[in-house]
Amino acid sequence: MTELELAKAIAKVLDNKKAMDIKAIHITEYSIVADYFVIATGTSNTHVKALADEVEYEIENQFSIKPDHIEGRATGWILLDYSSVLVHVFTGESREYYNLERLWSDANQIDLSDVLTDD
């Protein structure tokens, strides 16, 4: 599985669990930290935790891939580290405050229209 395929699979899991404003950003040229960010918003702290839990469960169940590290389980921002793909799940307030899309605005956004639903 390529890093892009993993990022898209994660976006699809988030979409299926009703995450909002899902974005994937290709950051390889701008950072050695990872190749992709997947960013999503939950409606509450409970929803953010449920989204992160679902990504962890589904990616392990479907592809036998576990995150190397998880941070922020008790905050409005949970990070799942899949080495080449970092998943950021925020509350709306936290996402607006940290504004990763602005910080990484030079990086290319990935078209997710093939994995996201229209609702």
Image: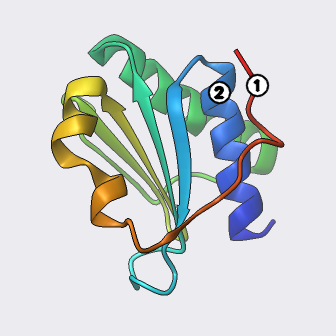
Residue 117 has which mark?
A: 1
Quadrant holding the C terminus: top right
- Which mark is first along the chain, 1 or 2? 2
At x 48%, y 74%, the residue is: 27
Local crowd size for mark 2, using a 10 Å CA cut-off: few (<14), some (14–19), many (≥20): many
Residues at marks 2 and 1 touching, judged by CB atoms closer than 8 Å: yes
Task: Please report the residue visible at 71 percent of the width from the left and 36 percent of the height from the top.
Answer: 12
Relative to 55, 79 lies left or right: left
Secondary-structure class at tag 2:
helix
Q: Residue 95 placed where, x, y %?
A: 27, 37
| SS state under label 1 | loop
Determine which quarter of the picture holds residue 55.
Answer: top right
Q: Position of residue 5 (x, y in %)?
A: 77, 59
In the rendered image, residue 34, in percent from the top left (x then y), is placed at: 47, 74
Closer to us: 76 or 73: 76
Please state which of the two labelled residues, at mark 2 or mark 1, is closer to the viewer: 1
Residue 41 in the image: above or below residue 68: above
Q: Residue under circle 2?
A: 15
Q: Assign the N terminus to one quadrant of the image.
A: bottom right
As drawn, 89 above or below 33: above
The residue at the point 50 percent across, 32 percent down is 21
